[in-house]
Amino acid sequence: MNETVNAMNLDLKEKILQLKKERNAIILAHYYQRAELQEVADYIGDSFGLAKQAAETDADVILFCGVHFMGESAKILSPDKIVLIPDERAGCPMADMVNAEGLKELKAKHPNAEVVAYVNTSAAVKAETDICCTSSNAVKVIQSVDAEEIIWVPDRNLGHYVSQFTDKKMIIWEGYCNTHDKVTAADVESIKAKYPEAPIVVHPECRPEVVELADHVASTAGILKYCRESDAQEFIIGTECGIEYMLKKENPDKKFHFITNVLVCPNMKVNNLKKAYRALETMEPQIQVDQEISNKARRSLERMLEVQ
């Protein structure tokens, strides 16, 4: 059975790579995607790295193996490109926890505040935002904002984390990542008892009490960098399990233990090889963003990319 599946996947990969050439396409994949999609990608990255690639590519077509808000960001940054997503049902519950209307109401209550939106938001929310950020550059973005009052949307856990690095007043929206927020301090203590020598490395979307127990806190790309450069041979990982593909690829002699078996984002896993092939073959589904919203949202993403 496995041999049959492997043969089918190999055939699909070859077809995808051929279609990619014919379409002058680039394939972008998030670290949380299935391994089979990371294997055919031209670039694998976190939200920040993928946004940069989308902004800079000279391809005619971007096949974005990620969730919907990521495809929207790619379309906003490269409006003349065709942006495809393998499955348009690949959404983000956290992004759905904030909408433009609610943000407008909050802005009216705090007219002197600047809005910093996590990139995990819809295009409509980005259009009401002063500057976006990813977990890779959130602290730098907060520190770059001139205003003394910041409206932060939508992730309360990441907001709590970055608030420790600034004296600015932060008004934090009550959203969260369904996957990272499931991890508890008890989960961390339980696995630490099994692997006492392994450093704990977690994503800042985790709860504050989990972050406090970690030896290192970083974005997805930051977790990979830490594990790559560390002398440790075993690690306890607190982020979505799709990162295991790259962790093992970069560190074949090291061992990785995920804090719990619930660190799986079902939305990320909606995409697969068959859907990626079909998207390139049919040139559907395409990501579309209203022109007025796109124009307003573009500046917040461009400002994010300018922060060094």
Image (cartoon, grey):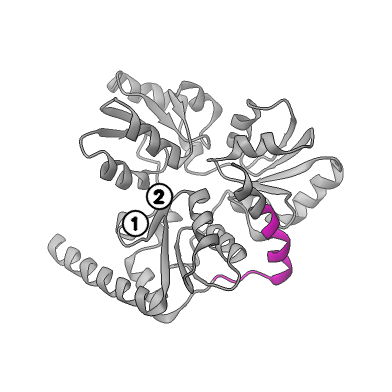
Q: Secondary structure at mark 1?
A: helix
| Vertical relation: 66 (above or below) 25 | above
Q: Secondary structure at mark 2?
A: loop
| Vertical relation: 281 (above or below) 204 | below
Residue 56, image x, y percentages: 52, 61
Residue 278, image x, y percentages: 38, 76
Amino acid of disc 1: Gln
**Quarter of image, res 73:** bottom right
Question: What stretch of residues is rendered in magenta?
Answer: 287-300
Residue 118, image x, y percentages: 62, 46
| Quarter that holds the C terminus | top right
**Quarter of image, res 146:** top right
Residue 112, image x, y percentages: 85, 40
The residue under label 2 is 31
Amino acid of disc 2: Tyr
- Seen at 58% across and 63% down, the residue is 72
The residue under label 1 is 38
The secondary structure that dominates the magenta segment is helix
Proximity of marks 1 and 2: CB atoms separated by less than 8 Å: yes
| Vertical relation: 258 (above or below) 28 | above
| 34 on left or right of 129 | left
| 117 on left or right of 284 | right
Q: Is residue 68 magenta?
A: no
- Seen at 48% across and 34% down, the residue is 218
- Residue 259 in sight here: no
Q: Earlier in the sequence, mark 1 or mark 2?
A: 2
Name the one closer to the observer, 300 or 10.
300
| 223 on left or right of 178 | left
- Seen at 86% across and 43% down, the residue is 111
